[in-house]
């Protein structure tokens, strides 16, 4: 099952449909007739549906906001599945944690660790010896170079770049098209070329 019913969830469903041996029974999340009508699978019910769902039913989270994924992961108490699109490239000694989703065109080169519920978007590049902590979000077209650290529930927005050896702290947001040439503090929003922190945030996202 997929937790979520928005456009991000539909993208996750498309990846699941392309993965051999994966069958999705439906989506779980807040009632929204407009979103539910666009789902290619049944809408199963709101979050309370999980209380009576079969115990052996795996899940992934189809929500783009990393802190929300972290909260749901704590609440489910279930086994999370991994989804790797067949058009993603996964190099040697890459560890992919439970619940992590790789979109088509994403490239993880070598010796990379991705924690739980990491979302790695379309045409994202991640270089060697990088660590992606739980619930990090890498949006389409961003580049994370070698030996980087992307903190828990941090967001790297579309087209942004993190150069070699730079860390982005927990809950931080690197804005679209920004280039991080030095570490981004936890909870900061950094924008521009080179990226500079603007303000503290509670872990916002530039994706739904």
Image (tube, rainbow, N blue to C red):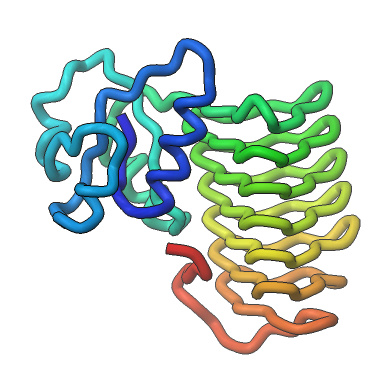
How many marks on residues?
0
Quadrant of the image occupied by residue 189: bottom right
Quadrant of the image occupied by residue 198: bottom right
For the C terminus, the image quarter is bottom left
**At x 16% / y 32%, what residue is drawn?**
50
Report the front residue among 120 and 88: 88
Report the front residue among 184 and 38: 38
* Vertical comparison of 181 with 17: above or below: below
**At x 52% / y 70%, what residue is drawn?**
206
The single residue placed furthest to the bottom in the displayed view is 198
**At x 84% / y 35%, what residue is drawn?**
109
Report the front residue among 87 and 188: 87
Looking at the image, residue 180 sits to the left or right of residue 164; the answer is: left
Looking at the image, residue 208 sits to the left or right of residue 84; the answer is: left
Looking at the image, residue 44 sits to the left or right of residue 83; the answer is: left
* Vertical comparison of 52 with 46: above or below: above
Looking at the image, residue 118 sits to the left or right of residue 65; the answer is: right
Q: Position of residue 53 (x, y in %)?
A: 15, 23
Q: Position of residue 188 (x, y in %)?
A: 60, 77
**At x 88% / y 56%, what residue is drawn?**
165
For the N terminus, the image quarter is top left
Quadrant of the image occupied by residue 40: top left
* Vertical comparison of 43 with 80: above or below: below
* Vertical comparison of 182 with 97: above or below: below
Q: Position of residue 82 (x, y in %)?
A: 51, 26
């Amino acid at each position: 099952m997929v937790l979520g019913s928005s456009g991000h969830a539909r993208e996750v469903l498309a990846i699941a449909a392309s993965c051999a041996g994966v069958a999705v029974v439906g989506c779980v999340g807040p009632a929204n007739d407009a979103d539910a009508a666009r789902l290619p699978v049944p809408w199963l019910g709101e979050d309370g549906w999980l209380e009576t769902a079969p115990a052996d039913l795996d899940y992934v989270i189809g929500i783009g906001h990393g802190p929300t994924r972290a909260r749901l992961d704590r609440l489910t108490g279930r086994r999370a599945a991994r989804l790797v699109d067949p058009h993603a490239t996964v190099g040697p000694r890459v560890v992919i944690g439970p619940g992590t989703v790789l979109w088509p065109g994403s490239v993880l080169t070598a010796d990379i660790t991705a924690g739980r519920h990491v979302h790695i978007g379309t045409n994202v590049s991640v270089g060697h010896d990088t660590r992606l902590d739980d619930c990090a979000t890498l949006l389409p077209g961003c580049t994370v170079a070698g030996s980087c650290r992307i903190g828990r529930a941090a967001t790297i927005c579309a087209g942004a770049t993190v150069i070699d050896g730079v860390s982005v702290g927990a809950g931080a947001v690197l804005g679209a098209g920004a280039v991080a040439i030095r570490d981004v503090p936890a909870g900061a929003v950094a924008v521009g070329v080179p990226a500079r922190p603007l303000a503290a945030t509670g872990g916002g996202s530039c994706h739904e």
